[in-house]
Image: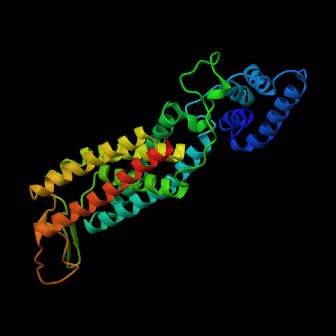
Amino acid sequence: MTTLTDRYVHAVTAQLPEGQRDDIARELRATIEDTVAAAPPDTDPVRTERQVLIDLGHPTALADSYRGEGRSLIGPRLYPGWVWTLKMLLAFVPALVVVITLVVGVLEDQTAVRIIVGAISGAFWAAISVAFWTTLGFAIAERSGAGQDDLGGLPGVAHDEWDPADLPEPRGRHVSRSEAIWSVLGNALVLVLLALPVRLGGRVEDVEWGQIFTDTAYSLRWVLAAGIALSLLASIFVLARSRWTWPSAVANLVGGLVFLLPIVWLAFRNDLFAWETLPLGWISEEPLVINETVTLAATVGALAAILVWEWVDSFRKAARSS
């Protein structure tokens, strides 16, 4: 168990930029210890410590005073993670979109100018989308009351009504940064690809590169994108908070269902893959016979297995964090 001073110092410094935390923690501990030591010998040290913390003020108010500014859209506790995540996504997602756009342009036998313009516009759109969704996810994590104790704060408690005894114990990460960032990267890439206004089709030499998905499936891509967007926000929340919470696990479940159910419906109607135009010429010169039922079942089964595993894992970790 940590002392009230430990919990208070953590609650204050967790809301400060990393470069300031160690120095301010030492300074704050020294101030608290000196004030408690200066109390009359006959006073209860536990009550004295509690009163000293109350006199110092609410952890959020004290952290604001150390920063010399109020809260912003992305507070200092989450700002470094927001910048790091944004840089990482901007380094990968637009580049992958450019590669995909170039390949599609070549396969569709587009002019060089059209290919270049498409690649530039695709990269620009991908960068804007990544910046928007990443900022929105971190802003939700910053403002949301759910999981606020991860920051050491006291959500919903007025600054003049707080009690040091209610400060939460400092917690470590329940979700590794690498696990969280891979989830964010995967969701962001799928979202950008779903929203790109391109479709595969065309011919390269003797290879026919036809349409993969049906017109119905293509028209439902915005529904799929909405589900992925919700899962992306949940994964960004987890990255920011370093843990799954019940709201983020539920959001991830709903997003996955919104993504999966239209695919199941299309597969049930055999309206997911455009069988007549699948680009199979590069596999064999002879026409290939595809077992449509097995292919559809395997596709839906693989997606469902991945999503179910992710849902179970998220709820298990949310239960462990609560």
Which residue is nearer to you in this view: 47 or 284?
Answer: 47
Q: Is residue 1 above or below residue 105?
A: above
Residue at image point 48% right, 34% down: 146
Residue 81 screen position, x and y as percent: 58, 46
Quarter of the image with the N terminus is top right
Looking at the image, how many numbered discs can be counted on the residues?
0
Q: Position of residue 135 (x, y in %)?
A: 49, 39
User: Between 93 and 66, which is closer to the camera in this rendering?
Assistant: 66
Nearer to me, 127 or 35: 35
Quarter where residue 4 is shown:
top right
Residue at the image position 60 percent from the left and 48 percent from the top: 172
Q: Is residue 130 visible?
A: no
Q: Tell me the residue at 20%/53% (across/down).
A: 263
Left or right of residue 141, residue 231 in this image: left
Compared across the picture, whether 69 is left or right of 257 comes to: right
Where residue 159 sits: x, y (%)?
Answer: 63, 19
Is residue 249 at all visible to an observer of this figure? yes
Residue placed furthest toward the front: 42
Please tell me in which quadrant of the rendered image residue 106 appears.
bottom left
User: Farthest residue in the top direction?
Assistant: 160
Q: Quadrant of residue 227?
A: top left
Q: Is residue 294 left or right of residue 102?
A: left
Q: How is the image coloured?
A: rainbow
Q: Residue at x 11, y 56 (%)?
A: 268
Residue 181 position in % (x across, y down): 49, 54
